[in-house]
Image: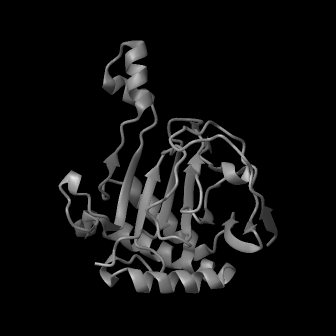
């Protein structure tokens, strides 16, 4: 697999800015090197076992078996205001966005959740197949990290063991997982993650373009094709997801993400 040497670029993009459609610059499998160190990789072809697991996870997510949080987008309200239509009609004209979290969830006292916990989805019997498929997908991703980034695998595994109670671990390298369906996230930085770690981002999509990960610091945008894996240090710099364009009503883009949060040592 080829190595792409990343360089730092100056830019004026701020956290919170929406990411417009940008043609991807990285469409082939590669290792990502920065300042002489491999910091991640992108794979457009996955092992058969991993493809099988994420296909099951995606199918279950799209079913009624998995509880999901529906997200209200600002453009729904904007369309409602401009066209003078009902919110229901505005939502029908827009792309449905939803997500599901597995694994560890940080305390949020202002939301009346004063303690760290494990996602309530784990108590839902109907979601059992989804949870199993996601965990198996996570473990397969970890094998690939061990293959392509052996030093990262060992250091991240040790960090999780030292900082995270066993009940809050998801796999060996992570605490949590989120499935983001049709979510074009604005530019952000995963500051809640443990430093010096990598996220694993799997993508399932159908009849869409866009929905690529844009990293302005490196002046690159990852295609995130169907059945692809991007391993990236999301704590390190800002990134955003480009606008998702559906080619028909059945089009979607679903990212299955594994990430290591700080704050689960007690």
| Residue nearest the viewer, comparing 128 with 143 | 143
Residue 1: horizontal and vertical position, in percent? 79, 73
Tell me the residue at 32%/52% (across/down): 68
| Residue nearest the viewer, comparing 34 with 172 | 34
Asked if residue 26 lies left or right of residue 242, the reply is right
Tell me the residue at 21%/57% (across/down): 109
Residue 244: horizontal and vertical position, in percent? 57, 40
Residue 105: horizontal and vertical position, in percent? 31, 65
| 189 lies above or below 152 | above
* Residue 222 visible (yes or no): no
| 67 lies above or below 82 | below
Residue 26: horizontal and vertical position, in percent? 74, 55
Tell me the residue at 61%/78% (across/down): 145
Asked if residue 113 lies left or right of residue 73, the reply is left
* Residue 119 visible (yes or no): yes
| Residue nearest the viewer, comparing 142 with 89 | 142
Dividing the image into 4 quarters, which one contains the C terminus? Answer: bottom left
| 117 lies above or below 219 | below
Q: Quadrant of residue 166?
A: bottom left
Tell me the residue at 44%/79% (across/down): 171
């Amino acid at each position: 697999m080829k190595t792409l040497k990343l360089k730092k670029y100056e830019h004026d993009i701020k956290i919170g800015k929406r990411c417009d459609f940008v043609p991807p610059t990285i469409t082939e499998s590669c290792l990502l090197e920065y300042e002489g160190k491999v910091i991640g990789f992108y794979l457009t072809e996955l092992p058969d076992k991993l493809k099988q697991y994420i296909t099951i996870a995606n199918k279950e997510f799209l079913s009624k078996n998995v509880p999901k949080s529906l997200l209200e987008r600002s453009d729904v309200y904007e369309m409602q205001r401009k066209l003078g239509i009902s919110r229901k009609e505005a939502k029908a004209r827009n792309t449905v966005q939803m997500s599901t979290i597995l694994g560890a969830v940080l305390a949020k006292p202002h939301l009346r959740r004063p303690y760290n916990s494990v996602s309530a989805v784990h108590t839902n019997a109907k979601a059992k197949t989804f949870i199993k498929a996601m965990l198996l997908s996570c473990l397969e991703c970890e094998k690939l990290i061990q293959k392509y980034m052996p030093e990262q695998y060992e250091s991240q595994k040790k960090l999780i063991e030292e900082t995270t109670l066993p009940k809050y671990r998801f796999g060996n390298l992570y605490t949590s997982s989120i499935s983001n369906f049709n979510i074009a996230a604005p530019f952000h930085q995963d500051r809640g993650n443990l430093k010096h770690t990598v996220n694993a981002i799997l993508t399932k999509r159908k009849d869409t373009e866009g929905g690529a990960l844009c990293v302005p610091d490196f002046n690159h945008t990852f295609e995130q094709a169907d059945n692809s894996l991007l391993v990236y240090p999301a704590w390190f710099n800002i990134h955003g997801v480009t606008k998702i364009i559906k080619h028909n009503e059945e089009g979607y883009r679903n990212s299955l993400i594994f990430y290591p949060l700080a704050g689960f040592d007690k």
